[in-house]
Amino acid sequence: MAALFFLAPMRAHALFEDTDARREILKLRKQVEDLSARVDPLTARTENKADTKSVLNLGSEIDRLRTEIANLRGQIELLSNDLANAQRRQRDLYADLDQRLRGLESKAVAPAPAENRQAELAEGEQKAFDAALAQFKAADYAAAIQSLSAFLQRYPESAYLPQAYFWLGSSHFARQDCSLAIPAYQTVVTRFSSSARAADAMLNIASCQLEQRDKGAARETLEKLLAKYPNTPAATAGRERLGEIR
């Protein structure tokens, strides 16, 4: 009981952090939409301008805005990942506390050689995934794509598969390649529907469809998101986006 009392303020603090993270994610998504709205008129102006210098200046401005959009998308994915990890750590914390309160009476047993080998493989798998994710965080999306693709081939039974496919899709998305991002996200939705990443993947599929000017497909994806994962942060953002489409 004393341990639960001690952890109560921690839990409240974590909830506030979750709320702040979700608010920041929505803010960044709004920035992406605003910047995207600025790119289209600039593109149209480059097509209508006869002055070569003006066209070059507008082209440079478009490239700058697109780079800024890609960076914002990367920040959104990182915040979403940090939020999911914080929620997972919170669940693990209380699960561990529950076990301790019930009392664990286990004896230390020296691991067998086979268990040592399994531990080594698990450590290598963890390092490979962490390295790929670090490349994404550093905005080196091309390297992240290469590393994540290699990870999926090398560890086809990994517990990290849902996250690996999700970050592969996010790397393509950050490079504005929705034709490759959507299949990676779709793999998360179809093969790992119970994963914490499935709802986020559906939301990003809808974002890609909006990028492709396919509002009908985006609306359908968002409606499926709300029906299948109604109580997730992704659904909260999906409701707002669906309202804007309508």
Image (cartoon, grey):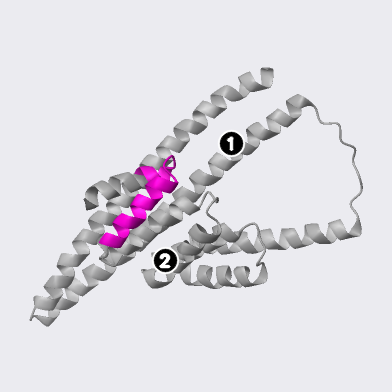
Where is residue 20 shown, x and y percent of the image?
41, 37
Question: In the rendered picture of this protein, how many numbered marks are placed on residues?
Answer: 2
Q: Which mark is residue 90?
A: 1
Q: Is residue 177 visible?
A: no
Tell me the residue at 56%/62% (across/down). 164
State yes or no: residue 229 in magenta: yes
* Left or right: 1 as drawn, with respect to 86: right
Q: What range is drawn magenta here?
A: 216-236
Q: Is residue 82 above or below residue 97?
A: below
Which quadrant would residue 161 be assigned to in this image? bottom right
Which quadrant would residue 109 be assigned to in this image? top right
Amino acid type, residue under disc 1 in the picture: Gln
Where is residue 46 shown, x and y percent of the image?
14, 75
The label nearer to you, 1 versus 2, is 2
Q: Closer to the N terminus: mark 1 or mark 2?
A: 1
Which quadrant would residue 49 be assigned to in this image? bottom left
Tell me the residue at 50%/29% (across/down). 13
State yes or no: residue 162 in magenta: no
Tell me the residue at 27%/70% (across/down). 63
**Crowd class of label 1 (few under 14; some 14 to 19; many from 20; radius 10 Å):** some
Q: Is residue 44 above or below residue 203?
A: below
Query: What SS does tag 2 mark?
Result: helix
Tell me the residue at 81%/31% (across/down). 104
Q: Which mark is residue 222?
A: none
SS assignment for the magenta stretch, majority: helix
Amino acid type, residue under disc 2 in the picture: Ile
Disc 1/disc 2 C-alpha distance (Å): 30 Å
Where is residue 68 shown, x and y percent of the image?
32, 61
Where is residue 154 shown, x and y percent of the image?
66, 71
Identify the residue under disc 2: 182
* Left or right: 144 as drawn, with respect to 208: right
Q: Is residue 118 above or below residue 2?
A: below
